[in-house]
Amino acid sequence: MSYVEAIKFLYDLQLFGAKFGLENTFHLAELAGNPHHRLRFIHVAGTNGKGSTCAMLESIYRAAGLRVGLYTSPHLVKFGERIQVNRQLIGEADIVRLVEWIQPLLAKFPKDQHPTFFEVVTIMALHWFEEQKCDLVIWETGLGGRLDATNIVTSLASVITNIQFDHQAWLGDTLERIATEKAGIIKPGVPVITAVDDRDAFRVLFETARKNNAPFWLITIAQTDFPPLRGLDLPLLGEHQRMNAAVALYTTRALAKIIPVSDETIRAGLCNVIWPGRLQLLTFPDGKKIILDGAHNIGGAESLRAALNKYFPKEKLTLILGILKDKDCARICEILAPCAAKIFLVPVNSKRAAMPTELAPACRAANPQAEIRGMKSIAEGLAAAQKESFLVIAGSLYLIGEAIELLDVSSEKPGERNLNEWTGAPSKR
């Protein structure tokens, strides 16, 4: 099997859609020898900030000398971004080997119960982390938590960054219901660390932790200025990243008896964290600035707007915006459109893309003075914005991945962004 064939095999698994439930994942893990039983995890859920918090935790524990696995989704450019050890992407040859290894296991499932793309990749990741003898795995949920494939593990800590609106068709239409799904990663006796700030969502998380006799750590804005965070300049922009850093810090505090980490190591890890596509600032030799941010829901859009107002209050910026139509497009446009003098609306490379004609009315209502243009693609948008000195590319992470390829600011190979595409119907409630 070639690498192209392996990627095609994974891509074809999307035919089985996306569905909730752990039965298939438990069964597939058992066929694989239950590698998760021989690994240690920090399980991270939440609406926004999961990936950034995972990157921070990985950087801290790697600075402490551990061999750290990192499992996240989606990837921006290269499939191997999902499965990393000490921030080294799994190689193409090993992806091929793992696909060949898992195929006989998949043959044991009836066709109508075939594991999904995410279930298959999750077990591949567990097998790889065990092979690599990881001391710790930073383990990000895919969607929700309770019935997400990642929830077959029992972790050292359950991290729930925050509870906001996203994926309502799958997780519920109230913050309380969404919190119930994400609280599903809470396990008996395992400490819970969260920065949730909604009262109803907090109540759900706290009560779930209490019923499980799980220590509960609530992180607030005040703790972002406690040592060792005080005076620390994070490489990731935005006040929301300071909250993510505080969540990562207090996760290490909760695990101090199991994995001791000094304040100096925590600072070193946070100072060196890298997480592309999230308020990522690119500065070019001619002085041109481009910000890439996957502000794909209301909370993400509000964080982006706050960061632009804080760091670039006087900049006259051009916004390239692309959103998936299953998001709250009107509200995202309402939040971001007033930030820009020019707005170029582009379709995301996805079957779920909202078309520029669908976004334009909301942008015009939010910012009547702006020049608003629809584009056939992000490539056309970048060409139209070639002479702009300050450009913000925002919306779907799929869009950010495509921008990274077109801007040639990634060393990874193109052509694998479609593996992020998923289909399926929301589960009945």
Image (spheres, grey):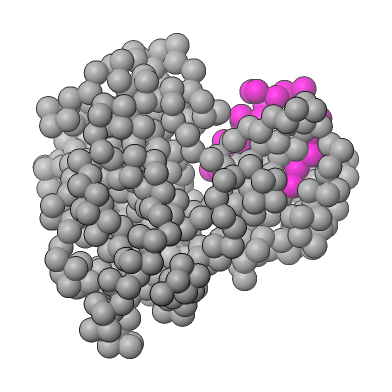
Instruction: Using the image, determine if residue 84 lies above or below residue 287.
Output: below
Q: Position of residue 148 (x, y in %)?
A: 32, 61
Instruction: Give the quarter of the image for residue 62.
Output: top left
Q: Is residue 288 magenta?
A: no
24 up-or-down from 48: above or below: below
Residue at the image position 75 percent from the left and 27 percent from the top:
285
At 39% from the left and 61% from the top, the residue drawn is 93
Residue 423, relative to residue 252: is it above or below?
below
Can residue 311 be seen here? The reply is yes
**Front residue of 313 and 228:** 228
- Number of callouts: 0
Q: Quadrant of residue 375?
A: bottom right
Q: Quadrant where the N terminus lies? A: bottom left
Residue at the image position 43 percent from the left and 43 percent from the top: 51
Q: Quadrant of the C terminus?
A: bottom left
From the viewer's perspective, tell me whether residue 101 is left or right of residue 283.
left
Is residue 171 in view from this perspective? Answer: no
Percent of width and height locating residue 186: 22, 49
Q: Is residue 2 left or right of residue 392?
A: left
Give the percent coordinates (x, y) of residue 85: 33, 45
Q: Report the side of 395 relative to 314 (left or right).
A: left
Numbered range of the magenta stretch: 296-320
Residue 420 position, x and y percent, is: 51, 63
Q: Please name the residue shown 76% across and 55% down the image.
A: 379
